[in-house]
């Protein structure tokens, strides 16, 4: 029980109202209002002075003053650029929108629970919300990754169109509801970079034996193409590259890659990020906690998440072009594009990886069918819109 009544006067007003109206017994009232967790006698005695001094009967709508103090865990380091910032902004926005009725305390990864235990923490109710990316949970719920990004899948604009307006949200909500969770779009990285390499990739044969930090489905695809996907945490990326433990790594895009210093230790900066063409970030709420909120607070969470989702995506766009220029100006890294032959092989291997997933997991099959249909249709439209425009 994390809900609480904020001020003593609110508690007392509510008590005076409830008892004077004689609509409910004191015992039943305490049980229903959740105040049973507070010491009943000390609560009553704390109320007495005001109760005696103030004979007015509080308005019934005093219940709307109920306040909620929630904990949000995240998969990001504390205050991590863009992704952590957006969590802090969500807390501030909800504070203002709700006039202090819904307060979020944001915990960076590891501050309350380890980053990759955020999912379980919110499922169990140990925290009310988390912010992360759904492909982190693919080991627990395979179908979750279709709501983040899959190799050669849709870009940010298309993913958001699918989720918000193309049938994605009902499927996402259905999948998460079974786990006691409610998901919201919280942002997008946009198309990521292909990564930093100390080996040239001129043909598909250069992928063979390539040791690359490439998590998720991208890593599985690389392995099918003969490479080795190496698991390296963000904190060990720099030294792993510097010492030659790995030949290549992807991270996010110019902004975060620059902050990580990868331009100082790698020879080539490849694009595009075929493995993450538009990773959707998620804010996820414990369903029981969400369902217990008044409708206006529920709407505030949805609206705040969606508006900050735009901020997040725009911030990536704004910062990536700024830091792309810094990398160009401050390093000798060569910018390369993957040859079409390499991309074709990776695309073919992606189909094999996805086929294995949907063959073995009916939930993934159902969600991927919707994903794939939307991707095909929106792709046809993009031929005449975005793609045609970029070719000017
Ligand atoms: Ca990445």
Image: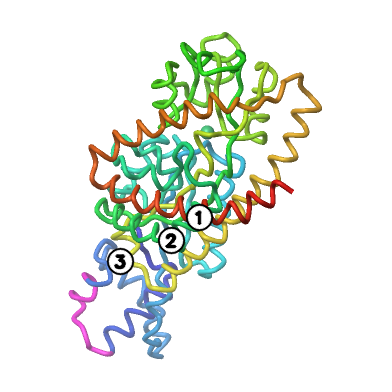
- Whether the residues at callouts 2 and 1 have beta carbons within 8 Å, the answer is yes
Residue at disc 3, CB closer than 8 Å to ligand 1: no
* Lower sequence index among marks 2 and 1: 2
Which residue shows up at 55% across the image and 27% down it? 250
345 vs 93: above or below: above
* Residue 378 - label: 1
23 vs 258: above or below: below
139 vs 23: above or below: above
Which residue shows up at 70% across the image and 46% down it? 391
Side (left or right) of 145 relative to 243: left
Q: Nearer the viewer, mark 3 or mark 2?
A: 2
* Residue 13 - label: none
User: Residue 317 in the image: x percent, y percent?
Assistant: 67, 46
Residue at disc 2, CB closer than 8 Å to ligand 1: no
Q: Residues within 10 Å of mark 3 (few under 14, many from 20)?
A: few
* Residue 42 - label: 3
Q: Secondary structure at mark 1?
A: helix
Q: Nearer the viewer, mark 1 or mark 3?
A: 1
Which residue shows up at 44% across the image and 49% down it? 72
User: Residue 371 in the image: x percent, y percent?
Assistant: 40, 50
Location of mark 2 (residue): 166
Please report the bounds of the magenta region as a residue range: 21-31
Q: Secondary structure at mark 2?
A: loop
């Amino acid at each position: 029980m994390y809900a609480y009544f904020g001020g003593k006067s609110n508690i007392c007003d509510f008590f005076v109202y409830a008892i004077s109206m004689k609509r409910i017994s004191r015992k039943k009232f305490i049980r229903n209002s959740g105040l049973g967790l507070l010491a009943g006698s000390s609560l009553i005695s704390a109320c007495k002075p005001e109760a005696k001094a103030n004979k007015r009967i509080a308005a019934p709508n005093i219940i709307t003053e109920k306040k909620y103090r929630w904990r949000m865990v995240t998969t990001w380091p504390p205050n991590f650029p863009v992704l952590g910032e957006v969590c802090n902004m969500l807390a501030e926005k909800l504070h203002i929108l709700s006039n202090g009725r819904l307060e979020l305390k944001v915990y960076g990864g590891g501050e309350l629970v380890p980053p990759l235990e955020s999912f379980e923490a919110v499922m169990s109710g140990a925290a009310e919300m988390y912010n992360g990316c759904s492909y982190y949970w693919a080991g627990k719920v395979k179908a979750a990754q279709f709501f983040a990004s899959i190799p050669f899948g849709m870009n940010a604009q298309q993913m958001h169109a699918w989720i918000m307006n193309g049938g994605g949200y009902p499927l996402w909500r259905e999948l998460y509801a079974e786990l006691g969770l409610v998901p919201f779009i919280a942002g997008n990285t946009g198309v990521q970079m292909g990564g930093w390499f100390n080996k040239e990739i001129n043909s598909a044969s250069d992928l063979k034996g390539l040791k690359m930090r490439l998590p998720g489905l991208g890593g599985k695809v690389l392995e099918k193409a003969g490479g080795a996907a190496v698991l390296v945490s963000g904190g060990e990326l720099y030294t792993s590259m510097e010492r030659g433990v790995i030949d290549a790594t992807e991270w996010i895009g110019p902004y975060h890659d620059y902050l990580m210093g990868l331009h100082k230790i790698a020879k080539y900066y490849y694009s595009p990020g075929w493995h993450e063409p538009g990773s959707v970030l998620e804010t996820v709420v414990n369903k029981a906690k969400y369902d217990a909120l008044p409708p206006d607070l529920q709407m505030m969470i949805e609206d705040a998440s969606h508006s900050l989702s735009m901020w997040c995506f725009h911030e990536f766009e704004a910062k990536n072009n700024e830091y792309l220029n810094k990398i160009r100006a401050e390093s000798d890294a060569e910018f390369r594009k993957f040859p079409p032959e390499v991309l074709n092989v990776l695309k073919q291997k992606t189909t094999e990886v996805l086929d294995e997933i949907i063959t073995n997991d009916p939930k993934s099959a159902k969600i991927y069918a919707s994903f794939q249909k939307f991707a095909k249709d929106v792709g046809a439209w993009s031929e005449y819109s975005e793609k045609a425009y970029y070719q000017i």
